[in-house]
Image (tube, helix red, strand yellow):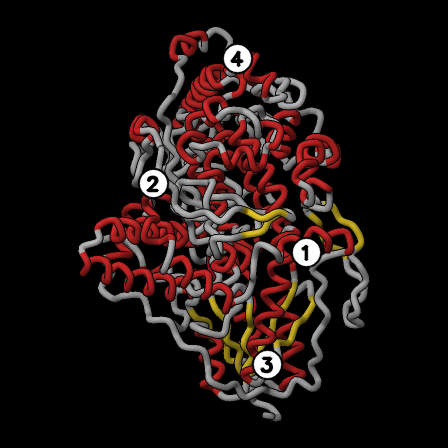
Amino acid sequence: MSSGGCSIVWFRRDLRVEDNPALAAGVRAGAVVGVFIWAPEEEGQYYPGRVSRWWLKNSLSHLDSSLRNLGTPLVTKRSTDSVSSLLEVVKSTGATQIFFNHLYDPLSLVRDHRAKEILTAHGITVRSFNSDLLYEPWDVNDEHGQPFTTFDAFWERCLSMPYDPQAPLLPPKRIISGDVSRCPSDTLVFEDESEKASNALLARAWSPGWSNANKALTTFINGPLIEYSKNRRKADSATTSFLSPHLHFGEVSVKKVFHLVRIKQVFWANEGNQAGEESVNLFLKSIGLREYSRYISFNHPYSHERPLLGHLKFFPWVVNEGYFKAWRQGRTGYPLVDAGMRELWATGWLHDRIRVVVSSFFVKVLQLPWRWGMKYFWDTLLDADLESDALGWQYISGTLPDGREFDRIDNPQFEGYKCDPNGEYVRRWLPELARLPTEWIHHPWNAPESVLQAAGIELGSNYPLPIVEIDAATVRLEEALIQMWRLEAASRTAAENGTEEGLGDSSESAPIAFPQDIQMEERPEPVRNNPLHGTRRYQDQMVPSMTSSRVRVEEEETSSVRNSAGDSRAEVPTNANAQQNAREAVNQGVLHNANRNTRQRHNNTTTFWLRNAAEDSTAESSSSTRRERDGGVVPEWSPPTSNFSDQFVDDENGIGATSPYLQRHPQSHQLMSWTRLPQTGLEAGDVENAISPSGMENIVLWQYMCSFYASYTNIDE
């Protein structure tokens, strides 16, 4: 072992030994100490959810085993300040260098900049690398050197870059270990006793770890990829890659995915397999959407909590506790929505098409604040990813320049016949509808009474009636948009008259607080076997438990979901309807014209969700064609003969394919990028335009970010 002068490799969301530039640099430099610091308090309100923590626990165990086989252990530290812990490790190991890989979310950008400043001041050499993207965000710009504001332009530039993404690196053959005798690992506690039974079920469906990620990638490339363009929409079969959790935790390199898929594309092109080529292009587009999520987050670091288009701050969101509770419990009366939400609750997973359906329903039909839905996804998804989730919800909410038109409602009934044509997905998660004929499975409210009786269904009793009729939701959405544009016009007029600040401010005038049931509450954390830190407190998302009989015995699924689960969650604040009432008052006398515009949208499309969440997103799964979930076995699916009706054919091009919403509304706002703010400090107007009132984004953090950009663009590649 080396007695000093070693290098620290700081692992974060790059939990692999192959194609890891920071690890490769450490091995080249000599002796290595691998370190992982668990400091979730630094994430603020985005403390990892239960299923995400379960994945991290197992992925770290896998990484530690791999590193030990190569010659060095993984040192784990429990902390509330990563930089302070790094300094402690430096002192105890005698390290002279620290290597880590880039992250692009706002908190990580600030933390990494602070780490470089402090460690450099202590005489430590710090180098960082690109391990998460094909190209760094600052390398992809338009002809004027400015960031792109639409996905199509961004991805076209990525595909036409003068140099290809770097080839993936092989894992090291051997690692010389630094001296860790005075640097003992802390025991990391990722779950409490109440979560262990639920988490045990996850292991039957998922296999975290970098080598398992490679197996999942190989399985997908040699199997479902060839028919990805044909089958990717099907929620009732395993036709996607299931790679998104692996990608989020950095268990597989996006560069490796890109290169292996491109090799397959060349092979199929030589064979003249046009379907295979099309599948590759669509799958690569999902990789591009993941890239774009990091690109947006880097250039607009408030995107996880503020709309990128300023007029959306005037939208009169409906703050309704009943709507939110019905949505998250899967009791909206729309089978596809309800099936999706119950699957999410039970497994921590959703097919990307179902993510689009449930999020669109949340925003367009219920008109609940999109940040509520994003936060709930963060708390409950295995592949919870701040950048991807923010992009997906912003797209669905129409707050991107090339996003989904806000006045376009996706009818769950017709979406059901596109992604679950035989009703098998609905039957799996809504056993109370299991005996309903396929003809009525996605709209039971239209079924004849005799059919309902034969299926044992009593609408309004053992299955709810629709919480909101689609026709009524269409009218209400049009009314809300009328009010939004009126308020935007009034604000614009006030700005032009000098009585209000100018454009570019997309912050909400009265930010809507998170509901209590997804707001993090402090409670004592279990005492850790860690004399350095003792007892700590953490903020728990209260992710629903999977310990009920619902997840063990399929026959009991109905009662568990409907009863015990429903009463276990806290309520949204009771002052919830104030904003809705205000909207109705404002709209008196001007909204009656909207009624004549009522229409049923029969061919609404769903074009994207990213993880990942995007239309062909990497919000896709890891693995084999046979999976076990919730104590039961998910059937092994072979690609069935498609019986999709031609009338339900969807868009193929995803984000940017439809006519941008703003082309019809020229009064749109300009996007505000923090990289264009003064680099010498923030002034009062800049602060108001650049940050929102959240606790995370205080002035000190943003001063770091503005000054950080100049140094970050010069980071070692």
Q: Tell me which residue sits at (60%, 92%) in the image.
A: 1
Q: CA distance from mark 4 to mark 1?
A: 43 Å
Please name which of the two marks, 1 or 2, marks the residue nearer to the observer.
1
Secondary structure of residue under mark 1? helix
Label 2 packing within 10 angstroms: few (<14), some (14-19), many (20+): many
Q: Is residue 660 above or below residue 632?
A: above
Q: Which residue is identified by label 1?
A: 200
Work out whether 596 lies above or below 354. Answer: above
Nearer to us of marks 3 and 2 is 3
Residue for badge 3: 68
Asked whether residue 553 appears in the rendered view, the answer is yes
Which kind of residue does numbered mark 4 sit on? Pro
Left or right, residue 283 beside residue 24 = left
Mark 4 surroundings: few (<14), some (14-19) or many (≥20) residues within 10 A: few
Going by the numbered disc 1, the residue's amino acid type is: Ala
The residue tagged 4 is: 448
Instruction: Identify residue for label 2.
Output: 654
| Three-letter amino acid code at the position of disc 3 | Arg
The image quadrant of residue 90 is bottom right
Q: Nearer the viewer, residue 666 or 475?
A: 475
